Structures are given as structure tokens and as C-alpha cells.
Amino acid sequence: MYMLKEFFQASEKRGTANIRPHCTLQIPNRVFKNILIVCLIATSSTPKYLVLSVSSQMTVWELLDLIAKKQNRSPLKIRLQRDSKKQEITIYDFCKSLHELKFEDNEEINIVKPIDTTGKVPLINP
């Protein structure tokens, strides 16, 4: 069971390929109003603040993709950061719905650079 769970988490790292998770079809559709998105890596050509109203059935990947399109960025080049008292959003949460992560009305989310997990290797041996 553990191996199967790890397989599904690893396969959902880059989105859900427009397939709705079964749990999102069971929950009632609710609209979260006035979710404030603060872009901490904004440039002069992209907005610093976004205010969105989104469905509770929306997955984290869909929200990330929506924000990335408005910021003219790749969804893989940004990371969503919530208030420190709330559950952190990781790459394993991309397939979860906003309802599962207990999003609320008037929530504030920061957009930050992703953590680089790739190691740097020298090209030449010294």
C-alpha cells in the first residue's frame, strides 16, 4: 500500500493532466472569494497583486497554472506559500483540491521562487 501511495504522489508532481480527482467530484462546489495573491518576485511587466475567486473543487495545480498564466511564468518556476499557521503547499499537494487543504475566503498567498533541489556538479575535475 505504501509503494502504491508513493507512486501516485510521484506521478502527480507536475499536475493532474486535466483529470479531476475523485474526491473533488464528491464535495459540494463552493466559491472562495477574494483570495489575495501577492507576488514577491514580480517584475515591472507583471502585476504585484491578484485577487481571485476560485472554486473549492479546483486543484492546487489548476490554481498554480492560473496564477502562472497571469504572471507570464511557467507553473514550475513559482511556488505558493501560505500563512505560517496553515498547511504548507508542497509538490505532493498539486493533485489535492483547495477544499482538502482547507482554503478560506480572504486568504493571502505569496508567490515565491521555488526551492532548487538539484545539486550543482562541477563540469571539470580540479
Image (tube, rainbow, N blue to C red):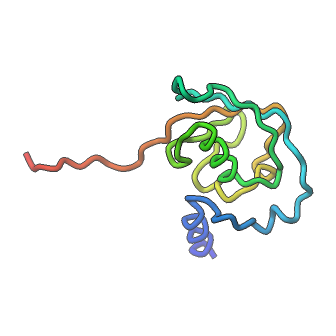
60 and 7: which is toward the camera: 60
Q: What is the x, y in percent for residue 119? A: 32, 49
Q: What is the x, y in percent for residue 125? A: 10, 50
Indicate the quadrant where residue 80 lies: top right
Q: State how many labels appear.
A: 0
**Which residue ends up furthest to the top in the rendered image?**
44
Q: Quadrant of the N terminus?
A: bottom right
Residue under the point 81% across and 61% down? 24
Q: What is the x, y in percent for residue 14? A: 56, 59
50 and 40: which is toward the camera: 50
**Which residue ends up furthest to the left in the rendered image?**
126
Q: Quadrant of the C terminus?
A: top left
Residue under the point 68% across and 34% down? 109
Q: What is the x, y in percent for residue 12? A: 60, 63
Relative vertical location of residue 52 with respect to residue 15 in this rendering, above or below? above
Relative vertical location of residue 40 with respect to residue 24 in this rendering, above or below? above
Relative vertical location of residue 5 with respect to residue 114 in this rendering, above or below? below
Position of 37 compared to 3: left or right?
right
Residue under the point 61% across and 44% down? 69
Residue under the point 23% across and 49% down? 121
Position of 113 compared to 61: left or right?
left
46 and 96: which is toward the camera: 46
